[in-house]
Amino acid sequence: MNAVPRVLIIGYGEMGHAMEHLLAGRCDLQVWTRRPVPGHEPVDLAVAVSRATVILYCIPVTPLADVAQRVLPALLPESISLSIAKGLDGQGRPAARVLHDVYAGAHDFGVLYGPMISEEIRAGRRAFAQLAGSKPAVSDVASQLFADTGLSLQTSPDMTGISWASVLKNVYAMLFGAADELGLGDNVRGYLVVGCMDEMRTLVATMGGKSASAQGLAGLGDLVTTATSEASHHHALGRLLVRKQLDNISGEGVHTLAMLDRYQLVDFSGYPLLQLVDGIIREPVDIGARLLATIDSSTGS
């Protein structure tokens, strides 16, 4: 990437802000969102796409297919697209699969997953991610783009594996929030890390990835961050379930469980902790007793 990269950030939520913070002043940067952004000139999507060498999708995975379809006709042949969207869309697809289906081999793309809390990035703290691309050139471009920004990238050959690891960690993170709200202690948290990772490794492999990918930044690294940070939405959801504050129990992890069930992607009975999260969302009663019973059953106590 010898010329100054022309980057278009699509979406201006928490992560859109974070990417702007990292890249401002380092490239020719534009931001597009469905609604006007204070302090930014209005951007025509097709025009902005037609000049961008890098597209950064900072939107949820649910609208990703529709937005990517709008982007597709204007993409430069040499451009690459990167997505940080976690979760599953309405067809049960992670972001990598969505871009694979929409781009149909015509354009290169990649995904970025790992411990990247937006507030910490914008405060100048370090962040970390795994990057997997449709071709090696994607990793080269992304590595140059984020060099010396404070976002450290590791390349993974397993796009499917890191995608599913990032999807699943949001589901399991809710258990940690529930355990913390119940005051079950650090020992239970330690057990949950091991138990959740056992299930994640098997699930990642079942979905076509490599089980080891669950142990990288996109899986274990982001699970620890999401499951223990008070700034984490999914940790907070676990707390809200215990408090029976149920008016706004929504998020990528909740949607993921619904999609896994709708498309029968997983037999929940084979994964006790996954089944427990699904059960307490459907019926948030006696959460502490059910959590401890699941642990006792798994450990033979």
Image (spheres, rainbow, N blue to C red):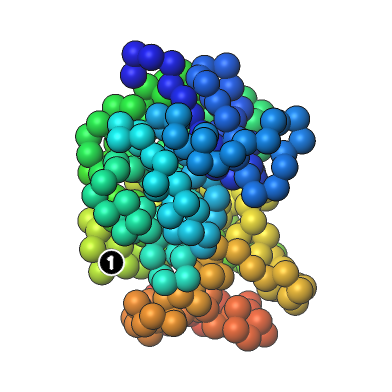
Disc 1 secondary structure class: loop
Q: How many marks?
A: 1
Kindly identify the residue that appears in the image at 24 percent across and 49 percent down.
105
From the top left corner, tell me how far across and down residue 125 is, in percent. 59, 28
Tell me if I can see residue 201 in this picture.
Answer: no
From the top left corner, tell me how far across and down residue 95 is, in percent. 41, 55
Q: Residues within 10 Å of mark 1 (few under 14, many from 20)?
A: some
**222 shown above or below 236:** above
Of 243 and 7, which appears nearest the observer? 7
In the picture, the quarter occupied by the N terminus is: top left
Of 37 and 294, which appears nearest the observer? 37
Q: Quadrant of residue 236?
A: bottom right
Kindly identify the residue that appears in the image at 44 percent across and 59 percent down.
65
Kindly identify the residue that appears in the image at 29 percent across and 27 percent down.
140
Indicate the amino acid at tag 1.
Met
109 on left or right of 234 = left
**90 shown above or below 9:** below
Of 62 and 154, which appears nearest the observer? 62
Kindly identify the residue that appears in the image at 70 percent across and 47 percent down.
35
Q: Quadrant of residue 134?
A: top left
209 on left or right of 51 = left
In the picture, the quarter occupied by the C terminus is: bottom left
From the top left corner, tell me how far across and down residue 284 is, in percent. 66, 82
Tell me if I can see residue 104 in this picture.
Answer: yes
Q: Quadrant of residue 227?
A: bottom right
Which residue is the site of mark 1? 207
219 on left or right of 229 = left
